[in-house]
Amino acid sequence: MKRLLVTLAVSLFSASAFAQVADRDVLVTPEGTVYTVEQQTPSDSAGVAATSILELSIQSGSSEAQHVLVPDSLSRGFHSDGTLAYDASSKTLFVLWTHMPNGGCSELLLASYREGKWQPAVSIDYRGNSSRRNLRLGITRRVSQLQKDGTYADAPALILHALWWDSNGRGEEARYAMLPIDNGSLAQDSVEIHSLEEFVGDDDTVNTVDAKFNSEILQHPAIVSSPMQSSIDVVFGDTEKKSIHKVTLQPIAEVRIHIPVGIGGGHGGGKPLNLIAPASFTADWKGPITVIERGDRLVFANATGKALNYLTYSDGTWSDVKSITLSSKLTVETALAAVDKMVSSQ
């Protein structure tokens, strides 16, 4: 199997520069190891059933990068949108991605990688006539546990938090999955999947936007921070109401670990933040959109092969779209770091 994976890695056709930006996720561990997961196209001679597969690159210090293929991405169909999370205590890397076995259905697959070995992928959600994209994966290591006196206290619990944009015959929306990990494996009987709209309350207001408004900015749910080890802050859009929401999701352990449905998304989750989308936004953004939160500011950024484009929400207003020209010396990651630093200092 190892020889097969090496052979396939060598025979992959290189993706274009833009494609690598469009379907790539990068993670740096506390130890300094850099993991990168990318979508690749196998050559005709590779001998695999998949039309698109995922490759994991591992860079540790100054040593040469190691390239391995995600084994379960070799199965028939189209594999894409790989995203990463890492548990430092167990030194385990988690990979979540979309698998489309055919054009009429899709599923989310979760696999883990530890000490050079892969655990078999688990299907999180399989549905016909549905597509998932713009995946994000976060991790928390504690949960609010109900005590005998009715109060809550933090207790150890490893939980993955998955976000994605879901499109089906009934419409489109941002969705969320709570994925508890027990002894290194997914506790499948405890998986919960929700529409993120369940956590913002009822509001039928439909905001007015420009006739050429680009709703792409609303279709990239993001984990913007983990205020505590037991909760995450999530930003997501609503294409029907032309709004953007921020909620805190905090799993609690009562009879079982779960996310209470309702405003706030958990014990002490607080009131969600509801924003009107940037009404005049007509920029031709395509591909991944990064969301950065710093204090009361939100930054939405999108990269092309030539520039990083971004706009900022602050004090109740949206800025115009601004651009930073990219070059061999100024990469997307460097430009994002510069924007983050600028926003943090304001």
Image (cartoon, grey):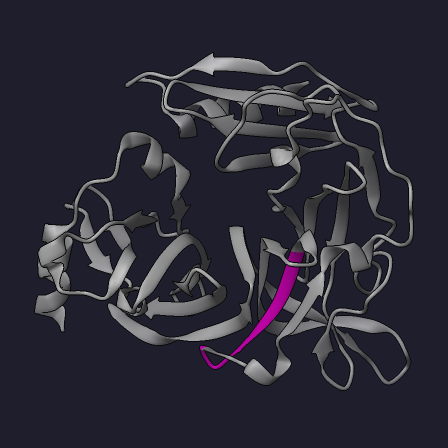
Q: Is most of the magenta stretch helix, strand or loop?
A: strand
Q: Is residue 30 left or right of residue 198?
A: left
Q: Position of residue 103 (x, y in %)?
A: 43, 60
Whether residue 95 is visible, yes or no, is no
Residue at image position (66%, 38%) is 218
Q: From the viewer's perspective, is residue 341 above or below residue 24? A: above
Quadrant containing the C terminus is: top right
Which region is colored magenta?
Answer: 175-184
In this view of the protein, which residue sits in the foreground, 294 or 187? 187
- Above or below: residue 250 compared with residue 12: below
Residue 325 visible in the picture = yes
Total numbered badges shown on the rendered structure: 0
Is 140 left or right of 258, judged from the image as shown?
left
Q: Nearer the viewer, residue 112 or 132?
A: 132
Choose between 25 and 225: the one closer to the eye: 25
Quadrant showing the N terminus: bottom left
Tell me the residue at 52%/72% (across/down). Answer: 124
User: Is-magenta flag for residue 177?
Assistant: yes
Q: Provide residue 169's location: percent of width, then percent of height.
A: 65, 58
- Which residue is more in the foreground, 5 or 90? 5
Residue under the point 37% across and 35% down: 21
In the depicted structure, whether residue 342 falls above or below residue 180: above
Residue 183 belongs to magenta span: yes
Give the percent coordinates (x, y) of residue 266. Answer: 80, 64
Which percent across, then down, holds residue 336?
Answer: 49, 27
Write the residue at 67% across / 14% down.
320
Picture quadrant of residue 220: top right
- Horizontal placement of 14 versus 83: left or right? left
